[in-house]
Image (spheres, helix red, strand yellow):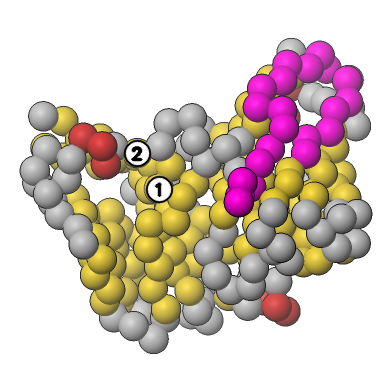
């Protein structure tokens, strides 16, 4: 089965909050990331959290980590049409020093007026 | 810094043809990765490298070869292209445990 799971789609109204959820299976994950991919472009890091943290806030973005349940979420406050993109959750363990990240399949966020 | 660059941006191949995709980074990163992205499948790791002269297989290595002769370059080769290799290919690099930096992608179509 997948190591990192995300729902595939999320639709929100402009101005509302968006919450994108992710679950992972490897309890030794040390870094958890959220990447954003706009159409026709590569992935760009939005934010990350270390596994010893519960929460991280960065302007409109809030990351929550529930290590017991292996659940990660990304909340985008006051969602704008420019936030429409695919959001990828990723986790990394230092497997022999090679830091191979595992990505979820991505959540397509659609923001409508 | 140009970051991570990929050439070409687009390519159409006939079945059985070969080609090489070039990835270059100017950040002195040790680790480099090749992924393919297909609809609904997310990113799947093809091959990766932890340093100059070393490469390793990822999740979906069959039909691909790689080389890392110089630290800044990571080449992905298709010896005999197949329609199943139609995809968008992304290269990424990272320094250590930090974030990955992605290139803009190469859109490959095999007919």
Q: Position of residue B104 (x, y in %)?
A: 57, 38
Q: Residue furthest front?
A: B1
Dot 2: chain letter: A
Which chain letter matches label 1?
Answer: A
Determine which residue is flagged by label 1.
A36
Q: Is residue B86 visible?
A: no
Q: Position of residue A17 (x, y in %)?
A: 13, 51
Q: Quadrant of residue A70?
A: bottom left
Which of B89 and B42 lies nearest the eye of the viewer? Answer: B89
Q: CA distance from mark 2 to mark 1?
A: 7 Å
Q: Is residue B27 left or right of residue B76?
A: left
Give the x, y percent position of residue B92.
Answer: 63, 52
Report helix, strand or loop for mark 1.
Answer: strand
Compared to A17, does A58 lie above or below? below
- Residue tagged by mark 2? A85
Task: Tell me the magenta residue range.
Answer: B1-22
């Amino acid at each position: 089965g997948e190591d990192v799971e995300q729902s595939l789609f999320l639709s929100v109204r402009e101005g509302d909050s968006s919450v994108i959820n992710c679950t992972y299976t490897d309890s030794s994950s040390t870094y958890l990331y959220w990447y954003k991919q706009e159409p026709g472009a590569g992935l760009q890091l939005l934010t990350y959290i270390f596994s010893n943290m519960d929460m991280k806030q960065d302007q409109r973005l809030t990351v929550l980590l529930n290590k017991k349940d292996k659940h990660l979420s990304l909340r985008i406050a006051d969602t704008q049409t420019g936030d429409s993109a695919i959001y990828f959750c990723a986790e990394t363990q230092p497997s022999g020093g090679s830091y191979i990240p595992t990505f979820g399949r991505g959540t397509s966020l659609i923001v409508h007026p | 810094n140009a970051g991570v660059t990929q050439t070409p941006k687009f390519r159409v191949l006939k079945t059985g043809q070969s080609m090489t995709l070039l990835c270059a980074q100017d950040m002195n990163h040790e680790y480099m990765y090749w992924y393919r992205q297909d609809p609904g499948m997310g990113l799947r790791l093809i091959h990766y490298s932890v340093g100059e002269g070393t490469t390793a297989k990822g999740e979906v290595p069959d039909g691909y070869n790689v080389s890392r002769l110089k630290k800044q370059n990571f080449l992905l080769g298709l010896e005999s292209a197949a329609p199943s290799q139609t995809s968008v290919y992304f290269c990424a690099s990272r320094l250590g445990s930090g974030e990955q930096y992605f290139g803009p992608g190469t859109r490959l179509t095999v007919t």
